[in-house]
Amino acid sequence: EAQVTQNPRYLITVTGKKLTVTCSQNMNHEYMSWYRQDPGLGLRQIYYSMNVEVTDKGDVPEGYKVSRKEKRNFPLILESPSPNQTSLYFCASSSLARDRSYEQYFGPGTRLTVT
Amino acid sequence: KNQVEQSPQSLIILEGKNCTLQCNYTVSPFSNLRWYKQDTGRGPVSLTIMTFSENTKSNGRYTATLDADTKQSSLHITASQLSDSASYICVVSLTGGFKTIFGAGTRLFVKA
């Protein structure tokens, strides 16, 4: 089954404790992206990657890192989490469709709480 | 500034009724516009995708329209069902398709 998976689905941590949220897709997509979703604000793009070893900042990259060493994986790293990073995080992937529509497939989400 | 604004913020309708959700954007350079449905706590699922040359796109009971001149889009839901209760998100991509701007969404409640 074609899908995007994220782990963990839920995480409660303390300020300053490094964490990684993994994202993996099995559709051989070149493009992957991370978003955070906060009430009333909609999804905001954190980082995206157009291919292996190619990453770029989205709208809210501060406090986050990513890496793309393999095509299928795109982990999100919080080196020193802070309470304002408490949010619902989504990973997404897409390929270049024939109509160049770049339809994105989203993972199930990771709910992160930083205390 | 690249922005996507949706209205209304929330909407309650009776089962079987039609409704229309609005999306205005100021994103440039424009590549494509997508409508997503998001159930609570789950990832968004694509409903329609339109490039600047497309005026309308349908997916079952969902019909999206796009006016690239006025930078407006709408999503029309016909004969609503209880399962249509969700958030509907308008998403605009810049040229190249990799940078995306999301609207805050319209929360739709369908009542029996």
Image: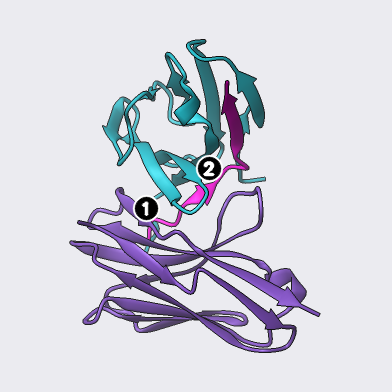
Chain colours: A cyan, B purple
Q: Which of marks 1 and 2 precedes in the sequence? A: 2
> Residue A81 at what x, y percent from top left?
47, 19
The quarter of the picture where residue A31 lies is top left
- Mark 2 burial class by Cα count in 10 Å: few <14, some 14-19, many 20+: some
User: Residue at left 39%, top 21%?
Assistant: A69
Q: State whether residue B96 appears in this view.
A: yes
User: Residue at left 37%, top 52%?
Assistant: A96
What range of the chain is rendered magenta?
A99-115
Callout 2 touching callout 1 (CB < 8 Å): no
> Residue A70 at what x, y percent from top left?
43, 24
Same chain shared by disc 2 and disc 1 = yes
User: Residue at left 28%, top 30%?
Assistant: A54
Q: In this view, does A54 lie above or below B19?
A: above
Q: Mark 1 points at which residue?
A: A96
Q: Name the residue under label 2.
A: A27
Q: Disc 1 residue type?
A: Leu
Tell me: B25 left or right of A12.
left
- Mark 1 burial class by Cα count in 10 Å: few <14, some 14-19, many 20+: few
Q: In this view, does B69 lie above or below A38?
A: below
| Quadrant that contains the C terminus of chain A | top right
Q: What element carries label 2?
A: loop
Task: Decide which of A22, B5 is in the foreground and name it.
Answer: B5
Q: Distance between the residues labelled 2 and 1?
A: 12 Å
Q: Mark 2 lies on which chain?
A: A
> Residue B78 at what x, y percent from top left?
62, 87
